[in-house]
Image (spheres, helix red, strand yellow):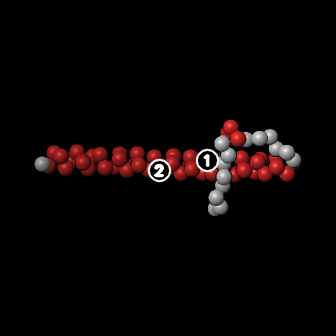
Amino acid sequence: MGSISIPDPGEVTPPTSFDEFQRQASLMTTCTLIWKELSYHFTSLEKHLRQKSVEIDPASKDLEEDQ
């Protein structure tokens, strides 16, 4: 994926042409899709880690009791 330059909100100027508006709309769509993908990815990681924690917890208690 290429480098995407995101302007400082203080530097954003209104589009001077319809082409510029389309470019900015496309950039926003891309950012939204990337955000959704990352959000899904981290939610999946969190769920997986919670499942592993539930699986490991009884085993760690068994180890503590054996000592």
Q: Nearer the viewer, residue 56 or 11?
A: 11
Q: Check the picture and name the quadrant holding the N terminus.
A: bottom right
Q: CA distance from mark 1 to mark 2?
A: 15 Å
Residue positioned 85% across, 45% down in the render: 16
Choose mark 1 or mark 2, whichever is in front.
1
Residue 25 in sight? yes
Q: Which residue is mark 2?
A: 45
Side of 21 where 7 appears, left or right: left
Identified at 66% across, 42% down, the residue is: 8
User: Residue most toward the front?
Assistant: 11
Q: Amino acid at mark 1?
A: Trp
Residue type marked 2: Leu
Q: How many marks?
A: 2
Where does label 1 land, which residue? 35
- Which residue is at 57% across, 50% downward? 38
> Quick one: label 2, few (<14), some, or many (20+) residues within 10 Å?
few
Q: Which residue does the image show at 78% across and 51% down from the upper left?
A: 23
* Residue sitting nearer the eye, 17 or 47: 17
Q: Is residue 56 above or below residue 11?
A: below
Say few, some or many: other residues with alpha carbon within 10 Å of mark 1 (under 14 / 14 to 19 / 20 or more): few
x and y, in percent, of residue 66 in the image: 14, 49
Q: Are marks 1 and 2 in contact (CB under 8 Å)?
A: no
Label 1 vs 2, first from the N-terminus: 1
22 sits to left or right of 52: right
Query: Relative to 52, is 1 above or below?
Result: below
